Image (tube, helix red, strand yellow):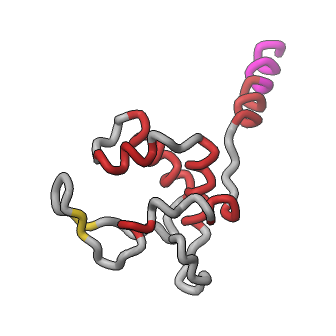
Amino acid sequence: MLVCAGLAFAGFAAQADEVKGNASAGNGKVWLCIGCHSIPDYRADYPLVYRVPMLGGQNAAYIATALSEYKKGERKHPTMRSIAANLSDQDMADIGEYYAAQTASSPNNPLK
């Protein structure tokens, strides 16, 4: 019983340390994203030509995880890696929540 209680407490402690994103805070943090991700059908040409995904409506946790993976070097795109290198866990969570909240009817943010 004591072991179960200890494991349950450890789970709650881990959740307390989890970063919670804030879409409003993310609103002002997406200025670097707009250069590529806000242009419909944009194709980047470095290092290879590929279609840049639109982020609006994407899952917040997916975006934060992807940014974290770029920061760690687990994803290899050099531009994304250099951008993510300067983001905190809170920044990544906020950016994820911001884009997750975007819909076709969202007001236009000149920074997105």
Most distant residue in the bottom direction: 105
Residue 60 on the magenta segment: no
Most distant residue in the top direction: 2
- Between 12 and 53, the residue placed more toward the observer is 53
Q: Residue at x 77, y 32 (%)?
A: 12
The secondary structure that most of the magenta stretch takes on is helix
The answer to whether residue 95 is above or below residue 4 is below
Is 14 above or below relative to 79? above
As drawn, 26 above or below 14: below
Q: Which quadrant would residue 18 be assigned to in this image?
A: top right
Q: Magenta stretch containing residue 7, yes or no? A: yes
The picture places residue 3, in percent across and down from the top left corner, at 77, 14
For image coordinates 60% across by 50% down, the residue present is 93
Residue 98 place in picture, x, y as percent: 60, 64
| Place of residue 56 in the rendered image (x, y in percent of width and height, measured from the top left) | 50, 71
The quarter in which the N terminus is drawn is top right
Residue visible at 53% across and 62% down?
30
User: Is 42 rendered above or below residue 69?
Assistant: below
Q: Residue 16 vs residue 30: left or right?
A: right
Q: Residue at x 53, y 71 (%)?
A: 111
In this figure, what is the number of numbered marks? Answer: 0
Front residue of 21 and 7: 21
* Left or right: 63 in relation to 23: left
Q: Which residues are magenta?
A: 1-9
Image position, residue 94 (x, y; %): 62, 54
